[in-house]
Image: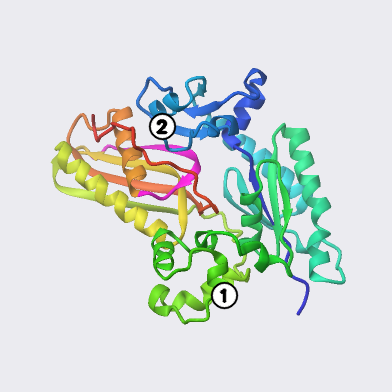
Amino acid sequence: MGQPRVIFHLDMDAFYASVEQRDRPEWQGKPVIVGSPPDRRGVVCAASYEARAFGVRSAMPSVTAGRLCPQGVFVRPRMDVYREESRAIMAIVRETAGELIEQVSVDEAYIDVSGRIDPAESADAFLHSAEPLARAIKAVVRRERGLTATIGIGPNKLTAKIASSSFKPDGLTVVTESGKAAFLRPLPAGAIHGVGKVTEEALRRAGLLTVADIQDCRDDLRTVVGSWWPELRRMAHGEDDRPLDFSDEVRSISSENTFGRDTIDRALLRSCLREQAAEIAGKLRKRNLGASTVQVKVRYSDFTTLTRQYSLEEPIEDEKVIYRLACWLLARDRLVLRPLRLLGVGVSSLREMRVRQLLLPLDGGRAEAGQ
């Protein structure tokens, strides 16, 4: 067996909010909430760590965030600024660590640095020898961009991502070849790539709550999770041979309905949106993906077609959240003032769900289609 791969998972810390705090030094140390103000119908796009301490999360209604954190500094998102910042950070990564990068969102990327590390006597030493390179990336990003990043190092994508997700902000963690199974043992079963809510519930009913439970199980649980059981056990032990995806293809999932007769019926439109959100959420869960951008699309009788979208810092997968964001977009831009020929919902900026999804349901939003 040759040397393992060395994979970095780079994750910027509270990216949108950190950019705002950097650009407005008087906001340093304050709870910054990126999104609509609390007196307007809208949602939170991102929150600083200071705001998260009050329970503020992405996709939460702004009015709820305002109640939880009345002293919060609310600021409108500047997506063009965040995208430009992302390009500058990824340029640093390429210059420092090479071109083998799979960028999965504006603030997150995998980097294969195997070819940039000197061979070592053991697999563990090989992985540890990548630490100086990771520290160099973090240092340059801090010095040139004024932002902090967390990097996880592992022999594959699974371990590298969990390493970065578990120790934020400004963290650097190495998961070794010999220690990867032990590192994963205390984590919930849902931490494993591919275990979505439905699979996690099936495992829970079978008594498998943690990764350790899966590692120790000697039964064949194909009746619980199907033919994926052997692969699930491999991943529970830290085995993951997924390659990095270097393509620039934009991944998205969408659902559209063309009505037999142009309609402005709010009840019909809401029902349509709910079905589309449920369809999209099902596809996301099946792939263990979350989406950071939600888009609505409308087409009128004269075939004029409009799209509107909103981006969040944390990915979402819940159909209720997708539905409410779609309703809010339609209402915000008053897109249902005349009959629609077509109505559609889409999500993009897809990425694997984090180890722990820190989202709360949209329990306080009142937006409905066209209202």
Picture coordinates of residue 277, whole percent (x, y) = 31, 49
Which of the image's four quarters has the C terminus?
top left
Is residue 305 located in the magenta-colored stretch of the structure?
yes
The residue lying at 21 percent from left, 49 percent from top is 258
- Residue 239 in magenta stretch: no
Q: Earlier in the sequence, mark 1 or mark 2?
A: 2
> In the displayed structure, does residue 135 sit left or right of residue 171?
right
Give the prevailing secondary structure in the magenta stretch: strand
In the image, what residue type sits under mark 1? Asp
Q: CA distance from mark 1 to mark 2?
A: 42 Å
In front: mark 1 or mark 2?
Answer: 1
- Residue at the extreme top of the image, as rendered: 26
- Determine whether 17 is above or below 120 in the image: above
Q: Which quarter of the picture shows residue 297?
A: top left
Q: Residues within 10 Å of mark 2 (few under 14, many from 20)?
A: many
Residue 253: horizontal and vertical position, in percent?
39, 54
**Residue 4, quarter of the rendered image:** bottom right
Is the residue 50 above or below the residue 307 in the image?
A: above
Q: Is residue 258 left or right of residue 354?
A: left
Residue 188 drawn at (x, y percent): 53, 59
Give the residue drawn at x 51%, y 34%.
46
What element does badge 1 sit on? Answer: helix
Residue shown at 29%/37% (left/top)? 327
- Where residue 103 sits: x, y (%)? 60, 51
What residue is shown with label 1? 216
Q: Secondary structure at mark 2?
A: loop
Which residue in the structure is indicated by mark 2?
43
Q: Amino acid at mark 2?
A: Val
Instruction: Specify the segment rendered in magenta.
Output: 303-318
